[in-house]
Image: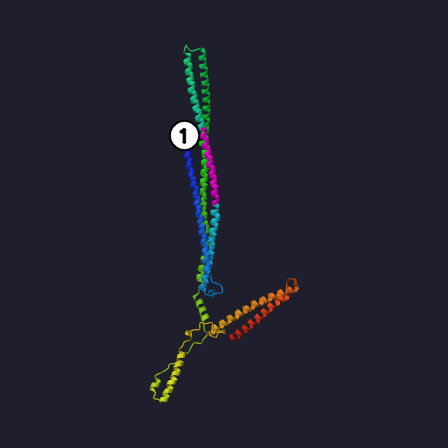
Amino acid sequence: MGDCWSNTKDQFDNLEKHTQWGIEFVERYNKFVKDRTDIETSYAKQLRNLSKKYQPKRNSKEEEEQRYTSCQAFVTVLNEMNDYAGQHEVIAENMSGLIYAELSRYIQELKQERKLHFQEGRRAQQHIESCWKQLEASKRRFERDCKEAERAQFHFEKMDNDFNVTKADVEKARQQAQTRHQMASDSKGEYSSSLQNFNKEQHEHYYTNIPNIFRKIQDLDERRIVKIGESVKTFSEVDRQVIPIIGKCLDGITKAAESIDEKHDTQLVVEAFKSGFEQPGDVDFEDFSEPIKRTVSESSLSNSRSDGKQESKSGKSKGKLWPFIKKNKGSGPEDFSHLPPEQRRKKLQQKIDEITKEIQKESDQRDGLTKMKDVYIKNPQMGRPESVDPRLAEIEQTIEKLRQESQKFEVIYE
């Protein structure tokens, strides 16, 4: 019995260690999911910051560059990368909610259920151990009473065969022997009852209680393993769900690459820098050897030299090809007269458009103030109508000034 009990206890110790390891493994896996979630969150944030960093700034040269298809494609890459970052945020959110949070809750349930099963197992062990101790105690008592009865019987028989002993002493010894026999008989009954009870409890312990507890622990461990499998599958599905959207992001980038049109971009450069100058004619040949061949007077020779110098200067002037003349890097005159004709027209049109926008802006302000004045007239408690007049007058002056400036550029443009 002692060996069998020890084996059962050893099994409980081993199962306790194994199930504790199982919980620690789930916690380790859950920590891995948490670290993966943090990486996805950080990666998504870095991608968004990268996309934002390289987005063209408003009202800058970079915004003007967006007319080129290559620059437009790059902006598409940035936008798609921003959407790509969003999918990594989705991965992080789903892993956190569907795996990490769920496993964290499950681990607490697992610990509590495991604790209850092993408490039940310890109670069963303590109970069978208590029954065993009761059996051992009744057995020792029966053994002791039997020995006492045997000694009492031996003493009675000795007294009964001794003729020197009085009948009273013999009777006393006989009664003591009977008493001891009765005690031994009672102890035997108690021992027999304890033995039957222990055998019953032992059978129930090894064939019912312990197997049931072991099955519960086995079921607990199997459910833990199944949960790990489900979590690993979810781990895969979280990634798989965003693959179609990530594929669309990559398709968008590919489409942007295919939309790059080198002919279109170079044509924009031609239009942007086209000067409008007429192409220069052929340069005439200047024969400097002619004066040497001719015999002329000193005066004529002198005149020829003078003419030659003038022609030389003229020739040098003609020799400068207009596409390569260095331009003034300064801001230039207000009427853009320093620019080639085509570029000048574009600048003038741009200036007229800017002034038109300013006029529209001021007109909108004027209309708003006019409506406000009407409200004040109808509802004097809201404000004084005349308080708006100074600002209206100022706006009218600004609009008139802008119109005059616009007319000036329109005249130049025509």
Q: Is residue 107 magenta?
A: yes
**x, y percent for residue 132:** 44, 28
The answer to whether residue 217 is seen in the rendering is yes
Magenta region, residue range: 103-131
Q: Nearer the viewer, residue 283 or 60?
A: 60
| Residue 305 figure quarter | bottom left
**x, y percent for residue 147:** 42, 20
**x, y percent for residue 46:** 45, 56
Q: Is residue 354 left or right of residue 159?
A: right
For mark 1, what is the residue? 2
Q: Is residue 317 above or below residue 375?
A: below
Q: Nearer the viewer, residue 4 or 406?
A: 406
Q: Is residue 332 above or below residue 222?
A: below
Q: Amino acid at mark 1?
A: Gly
Q: Residue, x 46% and y 52% (percent of image)?
A: 41
The extreme top residue here reads: 163
The extreme bottom residue here reads: 297
**x, y percent for residue 13:** 42, 36
Q: Which SS type dominates the magenta stretch?
A: helix
Q: Is residue 390 magenta?
A: no
Q: How many circles with numbers are drawn on the protein?
A: 1
Report helix, strand or loop for mark 1. Answer: helix
Question: Dot 1 surroundings within 10 Å: few (below 14), some, or many (20 or more)?
Answer: few
Q: Residue, x 44% and y 28% (percent of image)?
A: 133
Q: Is residue 185 above or below residue 127?
A: above
| Residue 288 figure quarter | bottom left
Q: By what rule are the colours in the image chosen?
A: rainbow
Q: Nearer the viewer, residue 360 or 238?
A: 360
Q: Quadrant of the N terminus?
A: top left
The answer to whether residue 282 is seen in the rendering is no
Q: Is residue 42 above or below residue 13?
A: below
